[in-house]
Amino acid sequence: MANPSKGKIKLIKNGTMLAIDPSSGSRGSHIGYALFDKGLLIESGEIDLSDEWGLPVHQRLGHIHDCLRDSFPFVDLLVTEKIRVVSRRGSYKATEPLVYAIGVIMSGIKHGAFVEIHPRTHIATSNRLFDEYKKTDEYDAISIGLCMIAFANGYEPKKIDNKNQEDKKNELIQLIQESYSEDYLHLDIIEEVT
């Protein structure tokens, strides 16, 4: 598993990072976002696209662009899920509008650097770090950001059987717990460490 934080550790630890779970605004889907400042989650949620679900894709994407531009004027690091365009062994075949949405996200948010992270990477990392992973647009964005923070702090999930990595896992969970504001302590993805 490649380290998605490579070359971006200073931005993750000292700057603003916006993690986005992309969407083209198709029926039932929203854009999940999680904003981090110096590695701390400061805001998360979903950009509600339900009013646009019936619109043609070009209008939905225009609305997404405007919402993102107005909501996030600049971030040091923009992170999205890596969207596979073609089928690879029968998985991760994206629709064209979702691929277009990545371009809209990149153009709608001014950013210093950009990283894509594979869905399997952030979900597997979150599953190892937290008791329960909930599949929602907001939690996907939080998971993307927390995965970047974990990698930036030296966590390597493939080495989890290693005692040092188990200690690193517990340190990361403690760091994340301490960094959350009271507003985010309700999230069920945070595991208790004794």
Image (cartoon, rainbow, N blue to C red):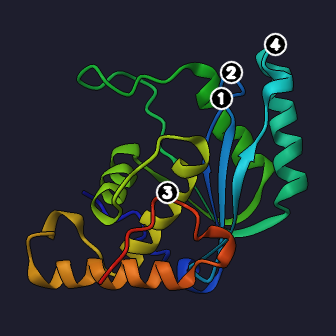
The mark that comes first in sequence, 3 or 1, is 1
Residue 44: x and y, percent? 68, 59
State the separation of the CA atoms marked 1 and 4: 12 Å
Residue topped by disc 4? 54
The mark that comes first in sequence, 4 or 2, is 2
Secondary structure at numbered mark 4: loop
Secondary structure at numbered mark 1: loop
Residue topped by disc 1? 29
Q: Quadrant of residue 54?
A: top right
- Quadrant of image for the C terminus: bottom left
Q: Bin the neighbour count of mark 4 within 10 Å (Cα to Cα): few under 14, some 14-19, many 20 and up.
A: few
Amino acid found under the numbered disc labelled 3: Ile
Residue at position x 59%, y 77% in the image = 180
The mark that comes first in sequence, 1 or 4, is 1
Return the residue nearer the eye: 53 or 102: 53
Amino acid found under the numbered disc labelled 2: Ser
Residue 66: x and y, percent? 89, 43
Asked whether the viewer can see residue 80, the reply is no
Residue at position x 37%, y 72% in the image = 151
Report the mark closest to the observer, 3 or 1. Answer: 1
State the separation of the CA atoms marked 1 and 2: 6 Å
Give left or right: position of 15 versus 151.
right
Give left or right: position of 159 versus 51.
left
State the separation of the CA atoms marked 3 and 1: 17 Å
Residue topped by disc 3? 144
Return the residue nearer the eye: 67 or 135: 135
Q: Bin the neighbour count of mark 1 within 10 Å (Cα to Cα): few under 14, some 14-19, many 20 and up.
A: some
The mark that comes first in sequence, 3 or 4, is 4
Secondary structure at numbered mark 3: helix
Disc 3 and disc 2 in contact, CB within 8 angstroms: no
